[in-house]
Amino acid sequence: MKYFILFGPPGAGKGTQATAMVENYHLCHLSTGELLRSEIAAGTQLGLQAKALIEAGSLVPDEVVEGMIESKFKTVKGVEGFLLDGFPRTIAQAQALDEMLGRSGEEVTSVVSIMIPDEMIMERIRHRATIEGRADDAKEEVVANRIRTYHDKTEPLVDFYRKAGKYNEIDGVGTIEEVRERIFTLMNKF
Ligand code: AMP
């Protein structure tokens, strides 16, 4: 099985590119943000716990997302691998992922990191807010907190995966098709 991690700041275009990636490489798309939003929509206990944190632009506890990912690894069949989108987001989550995969003799295949300059992040999220209607895109202070959380807690993963020799960066500036081509060129190597 292949385990790709789709990495990048909020608004980098991860969700947009994920659709083409899963189709082309027969992967299961696992977006922890989307999984959490469906828990909220379904009104589950987990959704209730996560709602306030998401709406504040903070991270939900590591154990919550780790549990969601592990249960998908166990139950999803008939794919050639997984595309992890929005997970891991902390060093602790990355270590938990290594352990999870290690137990079945598997490992992360590659990190596909879509990078855009800081000044484009706000602009992209403002644009997405008019299309998708996500509550956590609507308020500037919430978006600012997500960007801060990304820099503080998630960006250290760049070094973590660089040291593991698994980090690959893609320039996320350009049309959707241009960025997709760059991603496919990289993924074809695995
Ligand atoms: P996303 O759709 O990836 O932008 O995620 C939306 C929100 O869900 C984030 O701002 C977090 O509050 C929460 N979330 C998603 N993935 C994770 C994760 N791996 N760890 C903690 N919180 C997460």
Image (tube, rainbow, N blue to C red):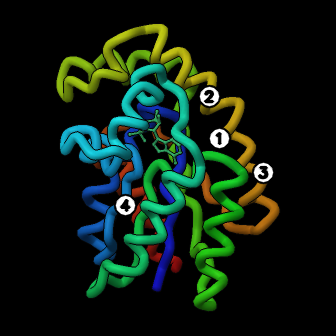
Q: Residues within 10 Å of mark 4 (few under 14, many from 20)?
A: many
Q: CA distance from mark 1 to mark 3?
A: 10 Å
**49 above or below 157?**
above
Q: CA distance from mark 3 to mark 2?
A: 16 Å
On the image, the x and y values in percent for residue 135 come to 29, 21
The first of marks 3 and 4 along the sequence is 4
Q: For mark 4, what is the residue?
A: 30
Three-letter amino acid code at the position of disc 2: Thr
The residue most toward the top is 140
The first of marks 4 and 1 along the sequence is 4
Q: Residues within 10 Å of mark 2 (few under 14, many from 20)?
A: some
* Tag 3–tag 4 contact (CB < 8 Å): no
Report if the beta carbon of the residue with label 2 is closer than 8 angstroms to ligand 1: yes
**106 above or below 148?**
below
Q: CA distance from mark 2 to mark 4?
A: 21 Å
Front-lying residue, 12 or 181: 12
What secondary structure is found at the residue carrying circle 2?
helix
Three-letter amino acid code at the position of disc 4: Leu
Residue 173 visible in the picture: no
The first of marks 1 and 3 along the sequence is 1
Residue at 19 percent across and 44 percent down: it is 42
**169 above or below 13?**
below
Three-letter amino acid code at the position of disc 3: Asp
Residue at 52 percent across and 79 percent down: it is 190
The residue most toward the bottom is 105
The first of marks 3 and 2 along the sequence is 2
Find residue 149 and name its label: 2
* Tag 2–tag 1 contact (CB < 8 Å): yes
Find residue 159 and name its label: 3
Q: For mark 1, what is the residue?
A: 154
The residue most toward the right is 163
